[in-house]
Image (tube, grey):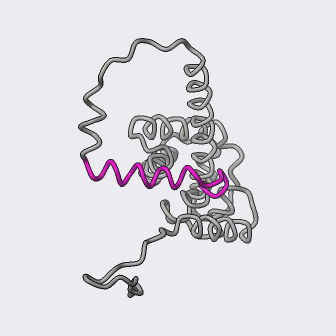
């Protein structure tokens, strides 16, 4: 019996092997999208819970289950982000409490890595949801166009065009450099 068939039939050992092989990839995918370790751990758990629930939909024939799992993870993360957004909206409607100085923000602001991550998250957050999903799957999780298309249930051409648009939006705009004592911008050397 094939590995896929064993998982589809509810073989716990096969499902444990699936987790061992792809759990790390699912966690990294969720972390890159959510930007929070604890939320990524929750997404990992929810992804495999959902994968167990959907196991009967797996085809007996086929290659790696990684694209399918990352597709499940993408849907789980999407639902988690929606829930967070709803919670934040509800909290915004609550009356404001008296502000208390928080020194943690000041300390965190001094760490370069936190600033870089914030800039990346901001640029990523400016992308459309479909572009974010393609960046997360192709760039961060290393799926090829075909695998990402399978994970998202869209044609390969759609994945390519979404990724192309996302890359154009994410290209950094760097100011021209100036030579000491010269008032004219110098062409950047690449």
Q: Which image quarter: residue 135?
A: bottom right
Of the 4 image quadrants, the one containing the N terminus is bottom right
Residue at point 41%, 77% (across, down): 176
Of the 4 image quadrants, the one containing the C terminus is bottom left
Observer-nearest of 147 and 29: 29
Q: Which image quarter: residue 156?
A: bottom right
Residue at point 59%, 49% (across, down): 6
Q: Is residue 53 above or below residue 151?
A: above
Observer-nearest of 128 and 31: 128
Count of marks overlaid on the render: 0
Observer-nearest of 108 and 99: 99
Q: Is residue 43 above or below residue 130?
A: above
Magenta residues, start to end: 111-132
Observer-nearest of 132 and 186: 186
Q: Main secondary structure of the magenta part?
A: helix
Q: Is residue 84 above or below residue 99?
A: below
42 horizontally vs 177: left or right: right
Q: Which image quarter: residue 189?
A: bottom left
User: Residue 102 at what x, y percent from top left?
Assistant: 29, 25
Answer whether residue 152 is magenta in the image.
no
Answer whether residue 127 is magenta in the image.
yes
User: Residue 150 at what x, y percent from top left?
Assistant: 68, 61
User: Residue 113 at what x, y percent from top left?
Assistant: 30, 52
Residue at point 70%, 70% (across, down): 161
User: Residue 109 at what x, y percent from top left?
Assistant: 29, 42
């Amino acid at each position: 019996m094939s590995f896929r068939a064993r998982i589809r039939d509810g073989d716990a050992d096969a499902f444990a092997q699936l987790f061992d092989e792809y759990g790390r990839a699912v966690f990294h995918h969720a972390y890159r999208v959510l930007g929070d370790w604890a939320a990524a751990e929750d997404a990992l758990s929810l992804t495999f819970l959902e994968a167990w629930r959907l196991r009967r939909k797996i085809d007996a024939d086929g290659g790696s289950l990684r694209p399918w799992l990352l597709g499940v993870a993408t849907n789980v993360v999407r639902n988690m982000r929606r829930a967070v957004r709803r919670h934040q909206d509800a909290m915004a409607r609550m009356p404001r409490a008296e502000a208390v100085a928080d020194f943690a923000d000041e300390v965190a602001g001094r760490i370069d890595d936190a600033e870089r991550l914030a800039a990346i998250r901001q640029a990523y957050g400016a992308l459309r949801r479909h572009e974010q999903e393609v960046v997360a799957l192709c760039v961060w999780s290393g799926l090829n166009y075909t695998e990402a298309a399978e994970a998202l249930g869209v044609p390969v051409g759609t994945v390519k065009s979404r990724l192309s648009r996302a890359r154009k939006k994410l290209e950094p705009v760097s100011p021209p450099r100036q030579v000491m004592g010269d008032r004219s911008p110098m062409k950047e050397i690449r």
